[in-house]
Image (cartoon, grey):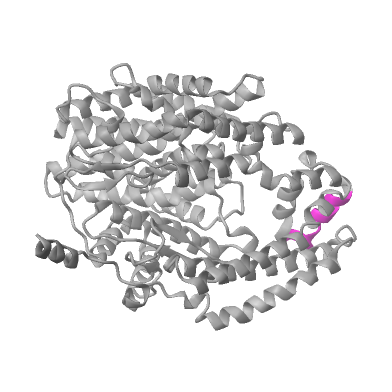
Amino acid sequence: MAKTAKAAKKSVKKLLTRDQVATGDTWDLSSLYPDPEAWEKDFKKLAKKEAGFEKFRGTLAKGPKELLACLKFDTEVDRLGEKLGIYAFLKTTEDQANDDSQRRMARFQAVASKLGQAASYMAPEIQAIPAKRLQELMDDPVLKGYRLVLERMTRYKKYTLGKKEERILAMQSEMAGAAGKAFRQLLDADMKFGNVKNENGEEQELTNSTLMEFLLSPERKVRKKAFEQYYQQFEGHENTLAATLSGSIQKDVYYAKVRGYESARGQALYADNIPESVYDNLIDSVHNHLPAVHRYFELRRRKMKLKDIHHYDTYVPILNNIKKKHTWDEAVDVIMDAMIPLGPEYCDVLKDGLTKARWCDRYPNAGKQSGAFSCGSFDAAPFILMNYKKDVLDDVFTLAHEAGHSMHSYYSAKSQPYQYYNYVIFVAEVASTFNEQLLSQHLQENAENDLERAYLINRDIDAIRGTIIRQTMFAEFEKITHAMCEAGEPLTSKSLQEVYQGLLERYFGPDFVIDPQLKLECLRIPHFYRAFYVYKYATGLSAAIALSMRVLNGGKAELDDYLSFLKGGCSKYPLDLLRDAGVDMESPKPVDMALSHFESLVDQLNDLL
């Protein structure tokens, strides 16, 4: 027994340390800085910029040249800070235990904070300029390149308070985040969920991050056990969690009222100039298509040979015996084949980035940040962090997704000045999920058999259900609970769960078993502490589906419209950028089109199975 245990211990495969990873499998950060010493030189330059802001104070109303000089200086500082900050951040993700990287990031954050304070007078001073004088300044050709910057800054004037009041609100910032911090500490540190045996009979710790692994298990008893054991902790802390969520909602309502917004939702949507009708259209469209969602759940129940269907049965693939392997090079090749409709320039740049130019940090290593992301910048390559695994098909989709973000950054940086290149979240998820749509279409067209095609269609269905349907349910919960708070209704554990129970019944349908624990889900969603954000996932994928169909079924004009969207950065408000690309998100049509596509996929899956 001792020898067997010793042999098993020796056979455990450990991750490579960062210094053991092959150079070709890592990103090349030299377009930012060739080494930490070069970073240090620019860091010293940035630190000296703090004093430079003071010379512009009190001059911004004098004339267009004076205002331009300040705006240019601020842009110059921000651009240098972005380059330094991204390098520092990316180095921390390579190995989170590396002390040098952590100290570098902390030093940058300290200087960035001081620079932010030094520049903090700019917006109030510009907003204080009398309307007639401000219009004269913005109309001057000298300020043409900053006109939209000034418009965006001054549109907040009616919601900006006096200096004394603004100072008081600024002093509240740490206190305002207390509810969210308490929630994260409780969820991530204090709540312990125990162990669960997986389908192989192995004891495995149940955590927030491993819950999904258990819900993907082909063994139903494993899924059920993990689900019930996980929510036992929420039953034991439901009043505390309800109090933190209520506190966060009250904070949103308080700040909206203080500043004079009609509602917390109105304040949240104001930054992107999004009418509340876009939010309501999304909810209404999803409601109209819920019968198709209910039909899918019934299809899933039948094909999984279940007597009844529960929430813990909705994540595991219906066909879980399909195995597809892609080495990194094979994944790049299949992605490039799928991207052919986007034209040779797009494909050439992306392929070079994924291979020769080393945009990607490819594989897991000890201490590396988990998950995946794309990090674009104005002066360097748009880098991608991956933890790629060749036997996980979702990792191929993740690479295509992050590549979409990176090409969006690439085109925006090449086409816009610094102040207009950085696109907002509302449009960010369009470019990434657009690429996933092209990849899915390509894989389905080239599937080896009907079972493989059904597996891919099932993946598409669940992606739409998770991103459009589920996120819209979250968005509706946020709308209802904030409205309750604004009406003076108490937000208690009972009232929050009653609202959520009603939404569960509506979205999952009459034939779905809503376990009593499931209404506690409203107390565990981190996004609820950043209210009115999740709807952007739903609108983003809806726009991506509509635009991908437009490009695949169109010609040069449709492709040019989409590429122009990628080049747009933030040179226009998001709705205008999407409208120019060919999709009007103020209309319910894009969401309806995406959900009609969902219905078609359900029919196809039913036929194939």
The answer to which quarter of the image holds residue 53 is bottom right
**Residue 166 percent coordinates (x, y):** 80, 45
Is residue 142 covered in magenta? yes
Residue name at image x 24 percent, y 25 percent: 309
Quarter of the image for residue 524 reads top left
- Residue 259 visible somewhere in the drawing: yes
Principal secondary structure, stretch drawn in magenta: helix
Between residues 10 and 408, which one lies in front from this camera angle?
Answer: 10
Q: Is residue 276 above or below residue 158?
A: above
Kindly identify the residue that appears in the image at 44 percent across and 35 percent down.
471
- Residue 604 is inside the magenta segment: no
Position in image of residue 518 (x %, y %): 38, 27
Above or below residue 312? Residue 331 is: below
Magenta extent:
133-144
Expressed as whole percent of the image width and height from the top left, the position of residue 314 reads 28, 33
From the viewer's perspective, is 546 left or right of 578? Answer: left
Q: Is residue 249 left or right of residue 391?
A: right
Q: Is residue 530 among what the camera can see?
A: no
Q: Nearer the viewer, residue 491 or 70?
A: 491
Q: Quadrant of the C terminus?
A: top left
Picture quadrant of residue 270 = top right
Pick out the residue farthest to the top: 510
Residue placed at 64% from the left, 76% from the top? 43
Residue at image location 82% in from the left, 49% down from the top: 127
